């Protein structure tokens, strides 16, 4: 029976390779449709465009009724600061002074829809920074609908600033504090700086830093490529340019908020971590920050080439009944029409030989100027700002959310073989030989989840960390390996049950468990505090284990030492769980296998 099963797998593999090979020169092949014909359980990502009942496009209505901080403090006195663009008035609440919705660039609307961000126009009077502004245009369907921003707009280039309560704005500011700039994730099509999950009050007050969170253009608004001439076409990467403009605004203005512009840490998770990695590669971002934290960076999900980005732009234009070369027609589209066309093209695999693009249809692309190569390539070749300290890590089961999100029905051994072949082509047999014997359940989604964890996240992160260490960089690695006591962890995309999935560390890091509908036990609260101690120490000193300038609480905790990642310490990583400890990587033999394949 076992030999028949293996024979069936090999036959399926051979047939699939033949089918894929036959598509090599066919630009119009829809690999998703091909795979759905074999396995109909694949989730439809181009499902009909759905707007939840509270969804508003291009509305700048104040969110006073839905934001708990504003709701509780409408009459609270707030500090006033003088920025380069005029006066800004915030609010003072428990744990922090907050300045919500400060514009860092002029609105990218009308003729400026697909243009680089422009400096803020100076204003008179006092700007009301007591409530969050609209998030960037996006749509939510399925399990994330309830977390979707209720108010979105093309006018969305705003940032939020959280300042510890002991900073007094009524007297000359004392010693400036380190700055932590948060870039949210969301597959470059969703997410918001003002999401309750990212409430910066706790992390700012606990770490004694100034925390900044920023919005940036998403989806087609931030990444459409319709041509090469910036005067007559959309040329993409606007979302990354927005982030860069926000970082520049921080450099010019953060001092009046008590922040030190010479001590900026940029950190992000998922697509946010991908953004941080790009800024580590982009020469014009070099002077805008001093160190970086990369949380769950999907190294192996490829950025598009210019050719592939233009192909996606052509498909997008076809959905709008505009010519891809008619920028006037494209600019005349309503935000709703742009979003609808974006949704309809979101499941298109532009290059059938890079199937992992299905996880990130819209996003940055290699334009040859701002972004010159894949992040994993840049890190391996040393083409990044190696002088900057870097802290990076993953969760222990990153791939669960992807495997169970894409495959909403059980996946058999034969079906899993088809998918592994579609992704890895000539390497599929070796990968199947490595993983198939480890999984005996009829449903092989756990196997696919582990492959995603290892190939997309863990192993390329390890290889990049080792390359950085070899080049003389200071690198620290971690794995978040704790399942919440009630077995439910908010991932930022969906719920994961009894798994340490993608984004599981976020409620612990931001102290935002209360808004994610689960309660931390006393040991879990200690884990959350310890994580904040590490991140705070890194922001202050560039070393997560440094006791210099730590809060009294952190000094009393006797935190386990987090050794720098190097071969002299047996490549130790910090295991972040209730009993945090430094350890040798538990999947080093698997990562050795992937490194040897050489396919990152």
Image: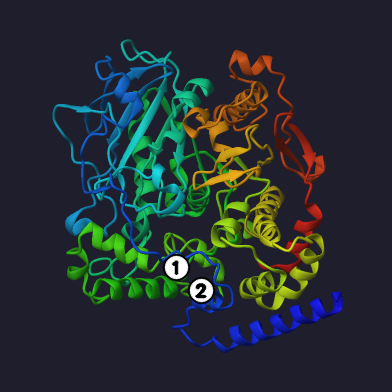
* Residue 478 in the image: above or below residue 311: above
The residue at the point 59 percent across, 56 percent down is 404
Q: Classify residue 432 as left or right of residue 494.
A: right
Residue 126 or residue 540, whichever sits in front:
126
The quadrant holding residue 599 is: bottom right
| Front residue of this view, candidates 521 and 359 | 521
- Tell me if mark 1 has few (under 14), some (14-19) or many (20+) residues whose alpha carbon lies within 10 angstroms of its own: many
Residue at the disc numbered 1: 347
Question: x, y (%) of residue 354?
Answer: 55, 72
Direction from residue 503 to residue 439 in the image, left or right: right
Identify the image quadrant of the C terminus. bottom right
- Left or right of 594, for residue 83: left
Q: In which quarter of the image is the N terminus?
A: bottom right
Which label sits on residue 493?
none
Q: Residue at point 20% right, 53% down?
A: 109
Give x and y (percent) for residue 198: 45, 35
Of mark 2 and mark 1, the one earlier in the sequence is: 2
x then y, percent, for residue 389: 60, 40
From what the image shows, is residue 557 above or below residue 497?
above
Residues under numbered marks 2 and 1 in contact, where contact means CB atoms less than 8 Å apart: yes
> In the drawing, what numbered circle is on residue 32?
2
Against 441, residue 254 (above or below) is above
Left or right, 474 with respect to 583, comes to left
* Residue 235 in view of the camera: no
Q: Residue at x 42, y 51 (%)?
A: 284
Q: What element carries label 2?
A: helix
Task: Tell me the residue at 33%/35% (across/down).
Answer: 252
Q: Does residue 244 appear in this view?
A: yes
- Front residue (pair 459, 140): 140
Residue extending farthest to the left is 124
Task: Report crowding for label 2: few under 14, some 14 to 19, many 20 or more residues within 10 A (C-alpha).
Answer: some
Cα separation between marks 2 and 1: 7 Å
């Amino acid at each position: 029976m076992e030999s028949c099963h293996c024979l069936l797998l090999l036959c399926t593999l051979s047939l699939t390779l033949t089918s894929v090979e036959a598509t090599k020169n066919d630009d119009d092949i829809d690999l998703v449709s091909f795979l759905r014909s074999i396995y109909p359980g694949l989730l439809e990502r181009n499902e009909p465009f759905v707007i939840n009942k509270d969804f508003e496009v291009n509305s700048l209505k104040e969110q006073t009724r839905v934001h708990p901080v504003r709701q509780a403090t409408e009459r609270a006195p707030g500090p006033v600061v003088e920025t380069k663009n005029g006066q800004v008035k915030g609010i003072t609440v428990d744990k922090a002074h907050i300045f919500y919705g400060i514009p860092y660039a002029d609105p990218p609307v009308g003729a400026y829809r697909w243009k680089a961000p422009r400096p803020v126009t100076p204003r008179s009077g006092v700007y009301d920074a007591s409530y969050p502004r609209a998030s960037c245009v996006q749509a939510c369907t399925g399990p994330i609908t309830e977390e979707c921003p209720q108010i979105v707009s093309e006018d969305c280039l705003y940032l939020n600033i959280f300042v510890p309560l002991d900073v007094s704005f009524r007297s000359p500011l004392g010693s400036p504090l380190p700055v932590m700039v948060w870039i949210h994730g969301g597959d470059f099509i969703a997410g918001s700086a003002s999401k309750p999950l990212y409430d910066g009050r706790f992390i700012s007050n606990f770490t004694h830093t100034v925390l900044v969170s920023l919005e940036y253009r998403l989806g087609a608004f931030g990444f459409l490529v319709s041509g090469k001439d910036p005067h007559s076409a959309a040329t993409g990467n606007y979302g990354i340019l927005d982030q860069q403009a926000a970082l520049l605004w921080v450099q010019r203005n953060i001092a009046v908020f008590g922040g030190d512009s010479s001590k900026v840490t940029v950190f992000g998770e998922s697509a946010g971590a991908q953004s941080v990695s790009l800024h580590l590669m982009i020469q014009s971002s070099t002077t805008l920050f001093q160190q970086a934290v990369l949380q769950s960076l999907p190294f192996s999900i490829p950025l598009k080439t210019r050719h592939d980005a233009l192909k996606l732009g052509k498909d997008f234009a076809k959905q709008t009944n505009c010519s891809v070369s008619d920028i006037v027609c494209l600019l005349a589209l309503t935000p709703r029409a742009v979003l609808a066309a974006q949704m309809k093209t979101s499941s298109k695999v532009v290059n059938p030989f890079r199937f992992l693009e299905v996880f990130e249809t819209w996003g940055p692309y290699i334009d040859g100027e701002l972004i010159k190569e894949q992040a994993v390539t840049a890190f391996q070749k040393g083409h990044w700002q190696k002088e900057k300290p870097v802290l990076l890590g993953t969760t222990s089961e990153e791939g669960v959310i992807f495997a169970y999100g894409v495959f909403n029905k059980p996946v058999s051994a034969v079906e899993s073989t088809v998918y592994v072949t579609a992704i890895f082509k000539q390497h599929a047999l070796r990968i199947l030989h490595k993983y198939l014997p480890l999984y005996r359940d009829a449903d092989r989604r756990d196997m696919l989840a582990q492959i995603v964890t290892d190939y997309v996240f863990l192993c390329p992160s390890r290889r990049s960390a080792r390359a950085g260490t070899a080049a003389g960089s200071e690198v620290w690695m971690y794995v978040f390996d704790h399942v919440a006591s009630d077995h439910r962890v908010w991932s930022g995309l969906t719920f994961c049950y009894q798994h340490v999935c993608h984004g599981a560390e976020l409620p612990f890091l931001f102290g935002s468990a209360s808004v994610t509908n689960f309660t931390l036990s006393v040991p879990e609260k200690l884990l959350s505090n310890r994580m904040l101690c590490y991140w705070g120490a890194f922001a202050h000193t560039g070393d997560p284990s440094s006791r210099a300038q730590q809060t009294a609480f952190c000094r009393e905790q006797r935190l386990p030492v987090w050794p720098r990642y190097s071969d002299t310490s047996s490549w130790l990583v910090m295991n972040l769980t209730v009993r945090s400890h430094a350890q040798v990587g538990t999947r080093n033999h698997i990562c050795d296998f992937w490194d040897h394949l050489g396919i990152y």
